[in-house]
Structures are given as C-alpha cells and as structure tokens.
Image (spheres, rainbow, N blue to C red):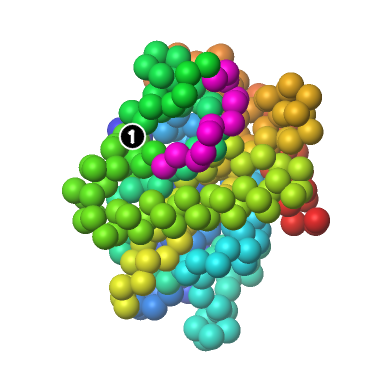
C-alpha cells in the first residue's frame, strides 16, 4: 500500500489532520469542531500513485475551478465563508484552499459517464457493457453514449484501487434512499455542467462526484468538483473534426505513464515536457470555462 504523502504546507495556527493523494486537511489548532481547511497541493496522481514531480500551480488552478463550479451549481455544497466563520485564511495557501463544513462522507465515488472512453471503452469491447450496464452495439472509442450513465465506485483507502460497484451494492452501503439521492444528484449535476461546458466549446466526457452528510442531515456536494483531476474534458471543435485526444485534464500524464511504466514498483519521474504540457492544458481549461 502506498503511504499517504507528507502535507505540502506547515501552517501556523492550523493542525494537519489528513493527507490524500492531492489534498491536505487542516483544522484550527486547539479545536475539535467547526470548519476545516482543504488545501490542494501541486501533487499529481495516476494509477493510484502520487507521482514526481508535481504540476506547478496545479493546486491553485484546481481550487479556482472548484470554487467556480460550486457557484454555478444549484445544489448544497460544503463551502463555508471565512468571514461568517470568523476565520482568517492562511495567506500562504489562500489561493489553493477552501474552508469547508465537516461532513460524514459517503464511501462512494459517484461516477457519471457521457461518452465511451477509458476503462468503459475497454469493457465495452469485451462485454458490450460499461460497469455491467448494457450499451447499444456498434459504438467507437470516444462516442457519445445514448444517455449519461451512473457507474458508482467504492472509494478505496490510500494506495488501493477504487472498485466499480453496482447500484445495488450502493444500496447495501448507504441505504436505498441515500443511494437514489446520490444517483439523481449526480446525473442532474452532470447534465447542468455538460450544458455549461458545451456552451464554452468544451465537452464533459465523464466525471466523479463525492457527497457527504452534514450534522443536520443535508447531503452536500463535497471535495473538488468538475476539475481536471476528477473529470475528462475535451475540446469540442477538435472532437467534431475527428480528433478525440485533445483533453484538458491529466490524460497526458496517464498516457505517458501507461507507455513508460508496467505498474510495478515505483513510477518513473515525469519528464519536464509532460509536466509543462499538463500545466498548460489545466490553465487553458479554466480560462475557457470561466472567461466566457
């Protein structure tokens, strides 16, 4: 199992309590309640490994994009206003941090796929289905699905592979009412986000959402949302002309790693050219979406 990375920042007045592949979580020193600080590092992960080096400026770009998307979506989320909470954001991470409500997170990654690509394409070639959901025959890699499909996954601990699960399994994990709410929210947010992206010349091919429940029982959209790390975004003009690999996400990293590593042992360091290309595509996406 891969160990959790060390936090990217030592923040006076804040206690580090958890690190994921990309984000570090803090709370005000001496407190056990109240808002938490989520800091997006420049770390990049692929195939369940944190890679070296990171992508310069990535954390700030992902945070800005998440904030922007939260503002576009009419669904409860976990953001907290620092002013209303009486908390001053640490200046060292102000552009890459979000103050959020503590939530009871559901152990499910709520994946929605609008296009046939990635692992879904591989499965479709073999079985004619994606995550066990039958799909019409005759589709090609990158084709749009007849309608978006909900393909949840179990969120595995650090260093382990997330596992695709059936909808029925989500019912077993969180109960029928919550499972239905997570599915319906995910499909609704995907539809809204797809329309927003399409109007800006960007295709949202697929994404994953995470949700949690607050102390009042409200289910809230949490973590990052619709970023280059959690989603596949494609250039619509390129797609329409038959070029289906003009992505605005870390697919550049995945492709290079798949071609240069057999997924045993420690992953190789990313070449400078791959880091630069990835950084440029992240920046282009946020410009495309937010400047329209």
Measured as percent of width and height from the top left, residue 272 is found at: 70, 28
Assess whether residue 154 is covered by the magenta stretch.
Answer: no
Judging depth in this view, the residue of 97 and 221 nearest the camera is: 221
Measured as percent of width and height from the top left, residue 117 is found at: 54, 26
Which contiguous range is marked in magenta? 139-150
Image quadrant in which you'd find residue 201: top right
Assess whether residue 143 is covered by the magenta stretch.
Answer: yes
Image quadrant in which you'd find residue 102: bottom left
* Quadrant the C terminus occupies: bottom right
Judging depth in this view, the residue of 260 and 231 nearest the camera is: 231
* Quadrant the N terminus occupies: top left
Image quadrant in which you'd find residue 81: bottom right
Work out whether residue 226 can be spotted: yes
Would you say 224 lies left or right of 34 here? right
The residue wearing badge 1 is 164
Q: Residue at x 50, y 55 (%)?
A: 188
Would you say 174 lies left or right of 184 here? left
Relative to 190, is 233 above or below?
above
Q: Count the marks: how many?
A: 1
Q: Residue at x 28, y 38 (%)?
A: 166
Q: Residue at x 68, y 25 (%)?
A: 244
Measured as percent of width and height from the top left, residue 151 is found at: 39, 39
């Amino acid at each position: 199992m891969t160990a959790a990375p060390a936090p990217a920042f030592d923040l006076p007045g804040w206690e580090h309590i958890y690190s994921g592949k990309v984000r570090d979580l803090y709370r005000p020193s001496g407190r056990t309640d109240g808002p938490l600080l989520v800091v997006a590092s420049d770390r990049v992960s692929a195939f369940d490994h944190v890679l070296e080096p990171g992508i310069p400026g990535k954390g700030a770009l992902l945070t800005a994009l998440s904030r922007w998307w939260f503002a576009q979506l009419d669904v409860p989320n976990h953001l907290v206003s620092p002013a209303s909470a009486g908390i001053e954001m640490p200046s060292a991470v102000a552009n890459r941090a979000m103050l959020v409500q503590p939530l009871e997170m559901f152990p499910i990654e709520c994946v929605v796929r609008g296009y046939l690509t990635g692992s879904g394409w591989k499965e479709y070639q073999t079985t004619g289905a994606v995550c066990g959901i039958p799909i019409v025959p005759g589709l090609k890699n990158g084709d749009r699905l007849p309608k978006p499909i909900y393909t949840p996954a179990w969120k595995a601990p650090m260093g382990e592979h997330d596992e695709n699960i059936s909808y029925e399994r989500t019912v077993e994990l969180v109960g029928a009412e919550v499972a239905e709410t997570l599915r319906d929210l995910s499909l609704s947010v995907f539809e809204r986000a797809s329309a927003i992206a399409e109007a800006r010349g960007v295709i949202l091919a697929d994404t994953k959402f995470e949700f949690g429940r607050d102390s009042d029982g409200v289910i809230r959209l949490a973590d990052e949302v619709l970023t280059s790390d959690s989603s596949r975004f494609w250039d619509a003009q390129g797609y329409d002309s038959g070029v289906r690999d003009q992505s605005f996400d870390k697919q550049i990293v995945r492709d290079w790693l798949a071609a240069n590593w057999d997924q045993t042992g420690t992953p190789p360091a990313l070449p400078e050219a791959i880091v630069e290309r990835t950084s440029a595509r992240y920046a282009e996406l946020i410009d495309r979406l937010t400047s329209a």
